[in-house]
Amino acid sequence: MAQGVFVVTEQRDGTFRKISYEAVSEGRRLADLLNTNLTAAILGADIATMSGEIKKYGAEKILVADDSGLSEYTTDAYTNVLTDLIEEQDPELIIIGASTQGKDLSARLAARLDAGLVMDCVAIKQTDGGLVFTRPMFGGKVLADVEIAGTPQIVAIRPNVMSIVETPKSATVDRPSVKVGEVKTSVFEKKIETGDKIELTEADIIVSGGRGTGGDFSVIEDLSALLGAAVGSSRSAVDEGWRPHSDQVGQTGKVVSPNLYIACGISGAIQHLAGMSTSKCIVAINKDPEAPIFSKADFGVTGDLFELIPEIIKAIKNMT
Amino acid sequence: MDVVVLVKQVPDTESLIQIAEDSVSIKTGDLKWIINPYDEFAVEEALQIRETQGGTVTILSMGPEKATEAIRTALAMGADSGVLINDPMTAGGDALTTAKVLAAALKEIPYDLIIAGQRAVDGDNYQVGSAVAEYLGIPQISLVIKEEIFNGKIRCHRVFEGGTVVVETPFPALFTTQRGLNEPRYASLPGIMKAKKKPLDIKTLADIGIDPAIVGKAGSKTKIKTLNFPSERQAVRMIDGESGAEKAANLVKILHGEIKAI
Ligand SMILES: Cc1cc2nc3c(=O)[nH]c(=O)nc-3n(C[C@H](O)[C@H](O)[C@H](O)COP(=O)(O)OP(=O)(O)OC[C@H]3O[C@@H](n4cnc5c(N)ncnc54)[C@H](O)[C@@H]3O)c2cc1C
Ligand SMILES: Nc1ncnc2c1ncn2[C@@H]1O[C@H](COP(=O)(O)O)[C@@H](O)[C@H]1O
């Protein structure tokens, strides 16, 4: 009978993505609830030393699938290798991070394993009837509680939502033999945007600007740099050519859940809210006291962002 | 190059979503319906590919008869023909059952390339494209913002957190769209007139030879138990102050001291 929790971690060039710690921590919590064991899988090339980093989050077993054919993510290679590992382990529950890679991979895997998949899950609870998975639909306008029939159950968890908890265990590390199998896609080139830019979906704090910036994002960038935050934007700012597509938050942009979201000169259109309404704390800065963003914010400041943000920067610098 | 575009009709993103009496579905009565925005990018890209490569653009959708409106819109943009899979047995199915139906329909439609949206903005499932590719046994590339076709291959620029990667694959293949790929054209009036005469087939599950037991509610591994509204935030606290400086200081005091967000 299928048994155990199996977490698929994500690394890039030898460094774990933050979602990996979230996924393993949540895996530990669920393995305890289900009274079972936790396995974490790492896929990649030249990753032999990576298992140490993940041990603190509570896996009993770590599988290191190390093969040159896994050096860059391709759907085919990763699905082939994971399918072998999963068939060998026969887990009851598989947890993957719903990153861009995890969404692509989990859906292909679910189809191959003929398993039910809950995508972009924000909460998991145990009931008498088994696990219940909560996920936003319609851009977060409703939350669905979903059950999965049969095993394995697959859940892809939304980045930045579930807590990272350290639970050191003495884990065994296995290096299973890897068969990459038939692969039709090949990675030709990889371009990483400039080094220390913080990824929106992983950021603790986001400072976002909209049409109200009139195209001048300098104060937003200053505040963001001071807070170690990521810069986001509304679609209008992207359409105007002020910001790249990758900065857009919303229904046709990124879905983010930071601790703190500061919306500056953004009116709060429903399609924008779809991308940030699960932020833990929302601050709105807008010169129009009637702007709809205020009805979705925790804290609001009315005024000109070009006056207020420099004052906020000053106040933060004065903080001891 | 024969391109098939997977198109779903979804409620307008402005819509007020209300939960129905059964508490597992939404009220559809007053909704305005549109083509899923990501599928619009897919239609546009298919038309651009046809302009350079020749061939055909076929629109494939599964849904109620009303979904013919979305297909007609895509035909008015310039697609050649449409197929709607319309069968009551598909109702209430999850993303993988939808993919099974679409894959079965694709056995009868010639294609070199399939384009899907990264997600449909109703269920936000992000699954159907990948699953269709798996059921057809063809490669997939997600979240594409640019593609080039040459030497019998397609090269796609796929975005990920903090960068892009260029992935190449031979045909047949499937890719999914990301904003940035193109700006979808509007349907012109002559386009709308012409679309009325373009072929649009409506088929049932029996027509595409798929067992109803593996689709719809019966075939779904995932089941919605209840839909709920997210809990409302507490009413906004407006930050007072005589001047901008005072407001800023008060805000920072709260963010730092009270909620410890900075
Ligand atoms: C299918 C579809 C998908 C969409 N997807 C997205 C999406 O993913 N993301 C998204 O953001 N939008 C999306 N939109 C667009 C959305 O409907 C809005 O048009 C957009 O979010 C508005 O951007 P904005 O708030 O920056 O601009 P506006 O609505 O023009 O608001 C500007 C605000 O700035 C304020 N302001 C002006 N000057 C100042 C100042 N000096 N100081 C302080 N405040 C000032 C104004 O009071 C106003 O409230 C989508 C629309 C559609 C139809
Ligand atoms: N009923 C459907 N008919 C046609 N295409 C669909 C249907 N459902 C989903 N798709 C396609 O799959 C993509 C992803 O949908 P989803 O996995 O439901 O978020 C959509 O953008 C469409 O291209």
Image (cartoon, grey):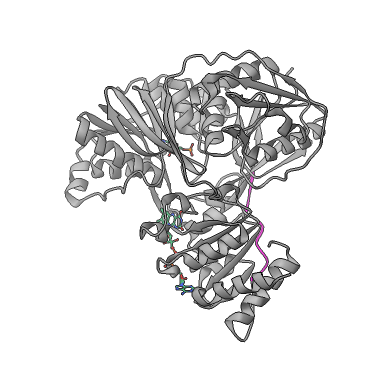
Q: Residue at x 29, y 42 (%)?
A: B44
Classify the position of the C terminus of chain A by image quarter: bottom right
- Please provide percent x and percent y for residue A132: 70, 38
Residue drawn at 65 percent across, 70 percent down? A317
Q: Residue at x 51, y 72 (%)?
A: A291
Membership of B212 in magenta stretch = no
The percent position of residue B58, horizontal first and vertical second, equals 29, 32
Left/right of residue A254 with respect to residue A127 in the rendered view? left
Q: Nearer the viewer, residue A55 or A85?
A: A55
Q: Is residue A181 above or below residue A103?
A: above
Q: Residue at x 62, y 61 (%)?
A: A227
Task: Name the quadrant containing residue B259.
Answer: bottom right
Snapshot quadrant of residue A68: top right
Rendering coords of residue A95 (x, y %) = 66, 32
Residue A21 location (% of width, % of height): 69, 38
Please state which of residues A173 and B55 is positioned toward the viewer in this rendering.
Answer: A173
Question: From this viewpoint, is residue B9 visible?
Answer: yes
Q: Nearer the viewer, residue A6 or B29?
A: A6
Rendered-image quadrant of the N terminus of chain A = top right
B210 and A127: which one is in front? A127
Ligand 2 located in image quadrant: top left
Is B81 on the left-hand or right-hand side of B215? left
Taken as a whole, is the magenta stretch helix, strand or loop?
A: loop
The magenta segment is B226-236
Q: Is residue B253 left or right of residue B26?
A: right
Q: Is residue B156 above or below residue B66?
A: above
